[in-house]
Amino acid sequence: MINVDKKTKLVIGIVLAVWGAMTIVPFFWMILAAFKTNAEIVAVDQNLLPEQWTFENFSILFERLNFDVYFINTVIITVLSFIGLFLNAMAGFAFAHYDFKGKEFLFLMVLATMMIPGQVTMIPVYLILNQIGLTNTYLGIVLPSLTSAFGIFLFRQFFSSISEEFFEAARLDGASEFYVFFRVALPLSTPILAVQGILTFIGGWNSFLWPLIIANDQRYYTLSVGLQLLQGQHASNHALQMAGAAFMVIPILIIFIALQKYILTGFDISGGK
Amino acid sequence: MNSKFSKLLKGSAMLATLSLLGACGSDDADTGENSEGTEGSVDELSVWIMGDGNEQAQGIFDAYTEETGIDINLQSIPWSSAHDRLLTAVASGEGPDVVQMGSSYMAEFTDAGALADLTEYVESNDALSADKFYEGNINTTEIDGSYYGIPWYTETRALYYRTDLLEEVGYPEGPSTWEELYDASMQLSERGEDMYGFDINFQEQTFGFMFARQNGSELITEDGEAVLNEPEFVEAIEYLKQFTDNGASPSQDLGLELSQTFGGDGVVPMFISGPWSMTNINNETTDIEGKWSVRTLPEGPENNMSNTGGANLSVWSSSENVEEAVDLIEHMTSTESLLTYYENTSSLPARMETWEEEPFQDELIQVFGEQLESSEHMPVIEEWASISQSYLSTFESIMIGGADTQEALDNFNAEVQSMLD
Amino acid sequence: MKSKKAPYFFIAPALFLLLVFSIIPIFLALFISFTDMSLAGLADYSRVSFIGMENYSTIINDQVFIKSIQNTLFYVVFGVPLVILFSMTIAILIKLGDNKFFSMMRVVFYSPSITNIVAVALVWTFLFNPSQHIGLLNQFLAWFGVGPVGWLTDTDISKISLGILAVWRAIGINMLIFSAALQSIPDSMYEAAELDGANRWQQIWRITIPQLKFSTFFVVVTTIIGWLQFFEEPFVMTDGGPLNSTISVALFIYRNGFQLNNFGYAAAGSLLLFIAIIIATLVQFRIQKIDNK
């Protein structure tokens, strides 16, 4: 990377710190609001820090939410959604490195799916799932959002930037196409895999719409749905919602920090493995 | 591989066709879980409640299960997604046995055939008889002469005011007429910059209609003719317009919570709202304890009619357990259950005799009880959602967009008329 | 040497799912757009009638729809360049720093994406408050004797305010994509440039930015698509107001379809939006091709 001297680094650091501080305020506010009373959240005088720290929001939350059930569902759905990550990677790899009949058309078709506003497809998708009998199943909940055009596109962009030579070398050794994909392409794609992993995790973790619509039973609700249930018809207890939101964000932070390492590893093209 | 792909295409096309056809015929198909019970006896009823149903009503259902041995499969639906969830239920034809219906949803979902006709039960069962409930609520369950729901809880709006501030301008009991409301608001707005008297709600879909009714407007006549540009309606809007024109009301959404506008110095010391705001003030605006009150709406030229809201309990049309479902509804709307429900949610009972119970003798609650005597629901027609939407933009354009009142209401009326025809 | 069948195996599962859950619904939407499908029609298909192009002819004369198109174009023109500029700048700055502190900044800039939308709405409503005593931004401007600005209440400014909010939310993910792409630029390229006497700016201009071409293309395409579907910000902040100054096409569609049950009308709106997005995307692909030659 470009060599930067200490002084420049300091200047960059300060710029980023100030900019970052402005960016992260709402996030901190969310976390801190979880420890405030609702009265304090809506008071005229606003402070970032709670006047009096309270853990009551959390205890109410855990008592009221069917927390154990929602938590397990959320984990199951998140894990299942990772299947989609591999499907996306495979498709992205194929679009980047093979020439096949109909490729342009099919890729445009993939992109097209990104362009239809989600609200329009909700009812048709529900009817289809209902017809195949997938209502009230985990499969029905994850299927509609398992693959994403965004993911396929991102993988394609990334794989396109990797030179063909890597794969040719493996093929000359007699490797199968699947071997090439799993053993050569995937390991090379760690930075993008990490980015996609974060997105997949967040998507699965926050899934709201399909668990709600596919379920005929609260047994299939996720944490997000549970959190929404806290919202009243006319008025809401913001403190309770923030406690829920703050709790839900912890696993995301952990995953982010864990996977961020892989975004940083990158790969060494010049080495020519 | 080409053939493989075309197979794939064919398969999916078939799937789509199937789903279309299947959905067409799904009305007479069996309805999944509801049909599991053996003939004559039911072991489970499914119920949809908006908001956190466990929190609100678990006790009521437990009592029912204990009494009858029938399990309740409760599904809570977040308020923000209630309409979407009901749409999908209409699309597939598969809904719960008992469903909570917001009173404003009644017309559209009844028109779509989603709700079962409960007329025979209302007429034969004394406990569910129409004269047991507030008229404003019964009107939302009765569509074209049939009943499609039983009123559950009710809401009406009254005037909240700061007693300390209103006393200073000579209205210790709050304003009792339109003239007094305006006079008090003007005086209060003269307390300084960014100080107002009364809140004109730009986002509330019933606000202008409510004032128009107080001025004698019918809104829509029995023959289905819109009269939203007649003098009764125009005058009411003109009356409200003076508030923003003269600084008695904020001409923009202040972007503040109730505790910030009503508490403290009382930036906006009067506003119209339902009983739920009492809970807010009690919990969050503790600095004005003893300095606020609620009264019935100020009398307009004709009356002081408020707006009824609330929710009904209905049976989904696909339910195969209508009789049992009605029995559950009877249990849920009994005085005992309504008291539990009130404790959990502060929702006021739509059943009149329940009001004789102790919790409703509270002075402020009584105000809402009194207001319910002069309160009506917005017209129960399926076009009302579109009309409300159109009202909001018209009202906004008059109040802050500088549009000519008569002209804007002429356009609005024409638009509404075209929706009705 | 490459197998002819392999690519089809690779794309089949993903494509199948997209076909069932996206493509088929698009065709259904197309079909619905020629009908007067309403809630009643959804329950009983015999109550749906074909009305040909009527939805389309009505919608192109609908003042609110036209307004929503203008607003959406404004969001795209205002927001997309800013998102790309900011997210690329931040990614490069973080990479330049290259130590623990700087990698922590990635989490910081990503935080808006993982902040609960209710919290986002509450905090920004507070920041944008029109009063000089309460609104933080207006308090700040008051120091310089400016304002107060009606961030969300002034019809000329509300669009810009929502744009700022949306840029703030969108930086995170694109910054991550740029960050990942930066890893694939081999150090040897910089070393060679340095030997040639290129300074830091020249290295950024001549190596970093050209090497980010692929990701930039990706980010431009996806950001434009995303911003053409601008929805959540006006939905939670202003509901399209005041006076429809912030309504977007997606919000217009949602309102007509889900709140007012005019599914046919909403489908017509979404098909028009769909076509607009396809055209915008094709144009970008064309530009990229010309660039590559």
Image (cartoon, coloured by chain):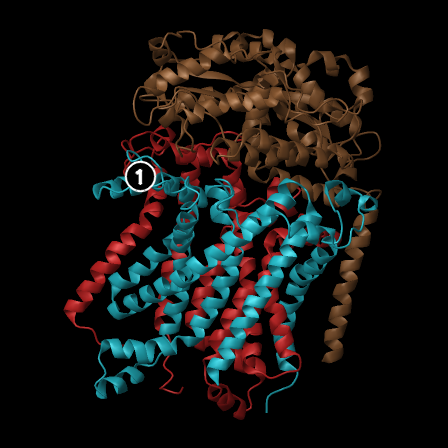
Chain colours: A red, B brown, C cyan
Q: Position of residue C214 (x, y in %)?
A: 44, 75
Between C272 and B132, the one nearer to me in the picture: C272
Chain letter of disc 1? C
Residue beneath disc 1: C148
Identify the residue at image location x=25%, y=66%. Answer: C99
Q: Is residue C89 above or below residue A122?
A: below
Which one is nearer the viewer's eye here, A48 or C251? C251
Q: Residue A15: where, in percent of width, then height?
A: 23, 59
**C18 left or right of C121 in image:** right
For badge 1, the amino acid type reads Pro
Residue at the spot 69% in from the left edge and 58% down from the top edge:
C25
The front one of C47 and B29 is C47
Residue C161 in picture, x, y percent from top left: 39, 48
Front residue of B263 and B398 = B398
- Please determine whether, in this image, residue B57 is positioned above or below residue A61: above
Q: Give the secondary structure at mark 1.
A: loop
Q: Give me the residue at 52% from left, 55% from top.
A: A78
Q: Is residue C175 visible?
A: yes
| Relative vertical location of residue A196 with respect to residue C140 in this rendering, above or below | below
Residue appearing at x 36%, y 27% in the figure: B260
Can the viewer see residue B51? no
